[in-house]
Image (cartoon, rainbow, N blue to C red):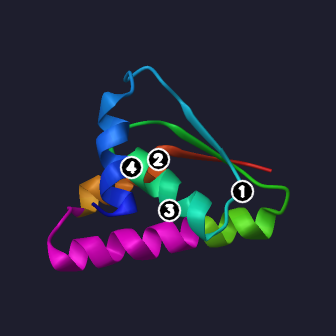
Amino acid sequence: MSYSTRLREHAKKIGRDTRIALVGAGQMGNGIAHVFAQQGYPVNLIDVKQEALDKALATIAKNLDRQIAKGSISEADKKTNVRQHQLVH
């Protein structure tokens, strides 16, 4: 079972009133933020560098666009996912 599959399964077990906070907006942090936001959780993505947060959100948007192209999600799903993220500098 891949890491992202395990993470999605774990995300399904957490209470819906939970807010996810991730410190570090690098490759791993933005990937985890993406998965939890797709499962409907509000996510605080925290980093000391605004540039890292901007890059993370751009990466998440690019990944969502790839999912739209594959037909995995809709444009509305992308908008919902992006709204789930709160960037904290």
Res. 65 image quadrant? bottom left
Residue corresponding to mark 1: 24
Kindly check if marks 4 and 1 are in contact, taking CB atoms under 8 A apart as contact: no
Image quarter in which the N terminus is found: bottom left
Indicate the amino acid at tag 3: Gly
> Which of the labelled discs sits on residue 78, or is there none?
none
Residue lying at 38% horizontally and 21% vertically, measured from the top left? 15
Secondary structure of residue under mark 1: loop
Kindly check if marks 4 and 2 are in contact, taking CB atoms under 8 A apart as contact: no
> Which of the labelled discs sits on residue 31, or is there none?
3
Q: Considering only vertical position in the picture, is 30 above or below 51? A: above
Circle 1: is it few (<14), some (14-19), or many (20+) Cα within 10 Å?
A: some
**Sequence-wise, which precedes: disc 3 or disc 1?**
1
* Residue 39 drawn at (x, y percent): 33, 43
Res. 71 image quadrant? bottom left
* Residue 82 drawn at (x, y percent): 45, 54
Kindly check if marks 1 and 2 are in contact, taking CB atoms under 8 A apart as contact: no
Kindly check if marks 3 and 1 are in contact, taking CB atoms under 8 A apart as contact: no
Secondary structure of residue under mark 3: helix
Residue corresponding to mark 4: 7
Indicate the amino acid at tag 2: Arg
Q: Does 63 appear in magenta?
A: yes
Indicate the amino acid at tag 1: Gly
Residue lying at 77% horizontally and 70% vertically, measured from the top left? 51
* Residue 73 drawn at (x, y percent): 21, 62
Task: Please indicate whether residue 13 sits to the left or right of residue 86 in the image.
Answer: left
Residue 80 visible to the viewer: no
Residue corresponding to mark 2: 83
Q: Which residues are magenta?
A: 57-74
Task: Please indicate whether residue 2 sits to the left or right of residue 83 in the image.
Answer: left
Residue 70 visible to the viewer: yes
